[in-house]
């Protein structure tokens, strides 16, 4: 008879262990409207667990403690503060410093390893196992009567220890093309990640180029507004001089001071914008924002105003070399191979399996269970020290509740979605190229028109300022001419850098940003 005491003890222990799952709630926030107090180590690091009294002053409210293990990255050692960097040099720094390229590289390497994992399914799987244990058996006594003789057995109890060493093999010989389809799918996926690695570099080149030109435009705006402030002060000095000689009025002097103050405000705002664009450039490169880098002046780069349009053949060749289009095409091929692999699940498989076992001691075992998902049990154990078995056969799937059919439908749906994604990617690529081409023509036309506007505004300002100095003009005319001049100068500068950005956008849309020098071509 089995005693109830051990069962009760086991039941109590199981209930105690079940309560451990809810005990972790003490490490969660107590209430939705009360700050959470983290468990902080001596170095300020937030660690798992409930808040403990460590003698540390926790920040009040919803402010978290500072982790002293986290440090701001220093500038790369190869950067020279005295060197004037060109756009191509900054792109070279970005390609080695920006985390985007490293993540894309790791993804490509993982995809290559996935191909190797798929190929390994063609090889046999060997598993070595060593187990040892203690065996105990007991049986009731034998009660029997033969004729006039009675036998009353006292029961049988045996025990023993021992060790079993096994070596098992599993080898799938034939599966009607499933493994080959999985390898093809993995190869196409690897090809897509390699293409996207190139695409990541193109995106990095483009982002650094945009940030570089944007910062150059902001710096040029600061320079122009500084010149505008000097012109406003010239008008103010002229009005003050006329006021001292009794030729001007207080209204004229006040109006000139207002124009000077307005120019100062615009300059301060432009300087703040230039600082922000500098931080954006450092972030695009992938170096700390507080890094000090000197950059090349590109304000006098000549622009070609030739009106050239993209032909249909040029668009076709450009779209067919874009990384996103090529990666989408590889994804469609991978999805087709996945459909073939799912279809092969309906077919038989030919396999061979076996094991070799060596037993010592007195363990009474008929088999050794497999340890882990990939290990099979060891069969054909006996009381002998050495035993072995080799099996071969065919596995035919008959019924699985529709799982294989559902998997095949999923693969077909994913293949159809991949085809749709390819078509959408091609359409988006053509749209981006057309938009970028229009941007180039618009910016070049605006640059040409702004040149004529700047020439006229400069002539008007020079004439108004000269007339005002000679007492024949008013301060209103001078300030209006000065305001028109700075607006024309800013428009020409913005159109110049917009043309450079548009040219880079067209090169990126056409998949032509293959190196750093391509980004500098206007």
Image (cartoon, grey):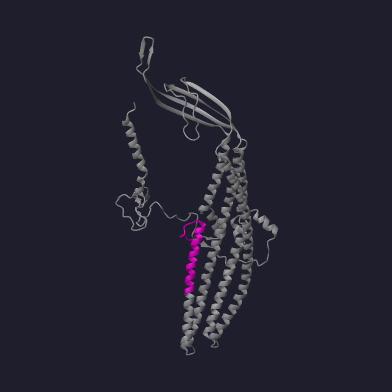
Image height of 138 relative to 477, above or below = above
Above or below for 42 versus 299: above
Res 341 quadrant in image: top right
**Tally of numbered discs:** 0
Q: Which residues are magenta?
A: 265-292
Tell me where residue 422 appears, x and y as whole percent. Answer: 62, 52
If the image is split into quadrants, where does the N terminus sit? top left
Quadrant position of the C terminus in the picture: bottom right
Instruction: Name the chief secondary structure element in magenta.
Output: helix
Please check the rendered image and state whether residue 507 is part of the magenta-colored stretch, yes or no.
Answer: no
* Image-quadrant location for residue 453: bottom right
- Taking the image as shown, residue 515 lies to the left or right of residue 374, namely right
Residue 301 in the image: x percent, y percent?
60, 66
Question: Seen in the image, is 31 located left or right of residue 442?
Answer: left
- Front position in the image: 96 or 425: 425
Please tell me which residue is depicted at 52% across the width and 57% down the height of the picture.
285
The residue at the far front in this view is 147
């Amino acid at each position: 008879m089995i005693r109830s005491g051990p069962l009760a003890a086991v039941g109590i222990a199981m209930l105690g262990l079940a309560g451990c799952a809810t005990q972790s709630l003490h490490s969660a926030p107590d209430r939705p409207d009360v700050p959470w107090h983290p468990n902080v180590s001596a170095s300020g690091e937030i660690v798992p667990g409930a808040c403990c009294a460590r003698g540390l002053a926790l920040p009040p409210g919803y402010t978290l403690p500072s982790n002293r293990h986290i440090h701001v990255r220093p500038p790369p050692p190869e950067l020279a503060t005295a060197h004037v960097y060109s756009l191509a040099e900054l792109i070279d720094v970005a390609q080695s410093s920006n985390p985007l390229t490293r993540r894309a590289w790791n993804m490509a390497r993982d995809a290559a390893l996935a191909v190797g994992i798929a190929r390994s399914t063609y090889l046999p799987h060997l598993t070595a196992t060593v187990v040892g244990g203690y065996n105990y058996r007991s049986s009731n006594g034998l009660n029997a009567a033969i004729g006039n003789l009675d036998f009353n057995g006292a029961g049988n109890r045996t025990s023993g220890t021992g060790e079993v060493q096994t070596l098992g093999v599993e080898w799938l010989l034939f599966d009607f093309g499933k493994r080959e389809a999985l390898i093809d799918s993995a190869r196409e996926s690897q090809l897509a990640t390699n293409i996207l690695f190139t695409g990541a570099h193109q995106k990095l080149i483009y982002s650094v180029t945009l940030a570089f030109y944007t910062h150059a435009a902001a710096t040029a705006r600061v320079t122009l507004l500084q010149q505008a402030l000097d012109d406003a002060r010239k008008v103010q000095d002229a009005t003050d001089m006329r006021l001292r000689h009794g030729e001007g009025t207080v209204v004229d002097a006040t109006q000139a001071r207002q124009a000077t103050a307005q120019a100062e405000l615009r300059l301060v705002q432009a300087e703040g914008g230039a600082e922000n664009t500098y931080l954006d450039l450092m972030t695009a490169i992938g170096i700390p924002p507080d890094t000090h880098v000197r950059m090349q002046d590109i304000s006098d780069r000549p622009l070609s105003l030739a009106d050239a349009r993209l032909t249909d053949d040029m668009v076709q060749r450009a779209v067919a070399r874009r990384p996103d289009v090529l990666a989408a095409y590889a994804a469609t091929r991978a999805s087709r191979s996945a459909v073939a692999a799912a279809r092969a699940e309906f077919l038989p498989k030919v396999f061979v399996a076996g094991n070799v076992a060596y037993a010592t001691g007195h363990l009474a075992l008929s088999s050794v269970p497999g340890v882990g998902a990939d290990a099979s049990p060891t069969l054909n154990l006996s009381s002998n020290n050495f035993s072995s078995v080799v099996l071969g056969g065919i596995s035919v799937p008959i019924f699985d509740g529709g799982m294989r059919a559902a998997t095949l439908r999923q693969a077909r749906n994913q293949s159809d979605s991949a085809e749709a994604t390819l078509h959408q990617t091609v359409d988006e690529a053509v749209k981006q190229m057309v938009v970028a081409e229009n941007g180039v023509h618009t910016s070049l036309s605006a640059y040409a028109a702004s040149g004529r506007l700047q020439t006229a505004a400069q002539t008007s300002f020079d004439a108004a300022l000269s007339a005002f100095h000679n007492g024949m003009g008013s301060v209103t005319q001078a300030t209006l001419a000065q305001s028109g001049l700075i607006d024309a100068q800013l428009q020409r500068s913005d159109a110049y850098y917009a043309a450079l950005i548009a040219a880079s956008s067209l090169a990126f849309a056409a998949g032509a940003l293959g190196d750093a020098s391509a980004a500098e071509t206007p």
